[in-house]
Amino acid sequence: MTSTDGVHFSPAPAGALDDARHQSEAAAGNLDAADRAIQRLGELLDGAEDQDKILLRAAAGAGKSYALRRMVKEALEHPSCARVAVTAFANKQTFPLAGDLGKELGAEQVCLFIAEKRRPDVPQEVLDHVTLASSSSGIPETATVIVGVSHKLGVWGERTRLLEHLGPAANGERPFDVLLVDEAWQLALHRFVTVDGLAPIVVGVGDVGQLPPIDPSENPWRGDPGYNPYRAWPTEYERSDSTCSIDLPAVWRPTAEQLPLWRAFYGDWDRLDCVAAPGDRSIHLPALPAPAHDVWTAVATGRPVLLEVDGLEDPEQADIDLPLLGMVERLLEPLLAGGFEISERRYDGIGNPQDEQTVSSAAPAGDPLIVVLATRNQAVDDATEMAERLTERYDLPEGVIRASTVDSWQGQTNRITIAVHPLSGAARLDDFNSAFGRLAVTCTRATHGLLMVARAGLDDLLATTPPRPGTPFGEPGTRSLPRQTHQRILSAFTRGTLRA
């Protein structure tokens, strides 16, 4: 498995994918789950008083925003719903959502409620399809969907101002009949309570594996071990009888070959399928020398790849590692010099395969082709400098390669991920780099290929470090990965070692 010239990769144990559904058969599971959520929402609007919250739980890349838009449209068609609000934690989440809703419903119906200083940040493709308002008095009376971050909709006195300007919705008391929260597991409980009173019914849609607003390994709310205002708000309600929880059982983002990794992260799902079928996604490589040929050929299979590098000089710190990034740069040079293409089968809204699209590194389009992810800002600064050097050296167009922190890239999608393993070179499972959500986001951004790089020694670290508790899907409690969970996730990778 170790070589000075090439790299021999040992394939991951065969995942149990004989039961996996693909294309329209897989997408049907999500459509059914969304239908059940819509039916339940209709029952609540009809006056059912046993529940007031719906949680549509998703794995990464499940097409949850599509489900949310469906719920918005279906709610507005109900006779007991006159107006809805859609919120999220960050503007980068609300902007595209507002634009997509505006395309479907019209700009006169969709108002993007945004702070005045944020207006220049709104992309033109969103501006073309929405109405903008910076104060409640500027919201047009024709608006039936108001989209804004929780910091805007939940500011003190906003509910009163909305009622004074727009009047109550069909419920007769509150400004909205339904409040929908996108990326719900990224919104802290203390932020959610500021918007909770805007509507009698709340729908939360999101990825349970995303990072919460802060790592709640320790409860900052002293005196009450069962309550944490800084944790993701659905954890306060998902076990309540007043909440209806439904899982989306399929993912649209990954290759079929990555599904065992997704299942390793979402082990409590009753089932998890993948819309992309084997062969629906591919990476076309140029002629490459060893060891780049071995590494990128392994990545091009669609299976997740873990490359451990042995014999490197010592890093500045475990997660600030210029020697490891230097190896990544040497592997990237022949790939970028020769140019590569990615192909993908496109699907309609119900998962039926359509035409095939090919994008090259000479003319990138859509999601970035390569994104380098690391945990610490300093490491990302180093990766950004590397990306800029490569871009200048090979005269690459924008969209070929960029770098980001893991935390900033959650909710984003790219074709190939190159990620520095959060525990590369570590001596222990520290609270930050062993967070379940941080590793989950790292591994679930890519649509075509995942290359995880690390210094050799991950197995030894996990074998010798003391076992620790972990509740990746349940809170309150630590969200740090227990040793056994981490080992299970690594077992889903194709693995090889390169000697520097």
Image: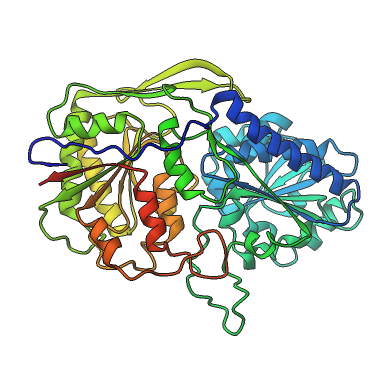
Which scheme is used to colour this image of the protein? rainbow
Q: Is residue 189 left or right of residue 409?
A: right
Q: Is residue 187 left or right of residue 500?
A: right
Q: Position of residue 25 (x, y in %)?
A: 60, 26
**Viewer-closest of 73 and 297:** 297
**Viewer-closest of 376 and 498:** 498
| Residue 109 visible (yes or no) | no
Residue 3, relative to residue 396: is it above or below? below
Who's the residue at 85% across and 57% down the image? 50
Q: Position of residue 421 (x, y in %)?
A: 30, 52
Q: Is residue 247 left or right of residue 41?
A: left
Residue furthest left in the image: 4
Residue 481, relative to residue 170: is it above or below? below
Who's the residue at 26% across and 62% down the image? 461
Total numbered circles: 0
Residue furthest top in the image: 355
| Residue 472 visible (yes or no) | yes
Task: Please state, as top left, top right, bottom left or bottom right, where the N terminus lies in the image.
Answer: top left
Q: Position of residue 309 (x, y in %)?
A: 17, 48
Where on the picture, by quarter, is residue 42? top right
Residue furthest bottom in the image: 223
Where on the picture, by quarter, is residue 321? bottom left
Residue 437, relative to residue 76: is it above or below? below
**Viewer-closest of 256 and 463:** 463
Q: Position of residue 248 (x, y in %)?
A: 62, 41
Who's the residue at 31% across and 29% down the image? 300
Where on the picture, by quarter, is residue 236? bottom right
Residue 480, relative to residue 206: is it above or below? below
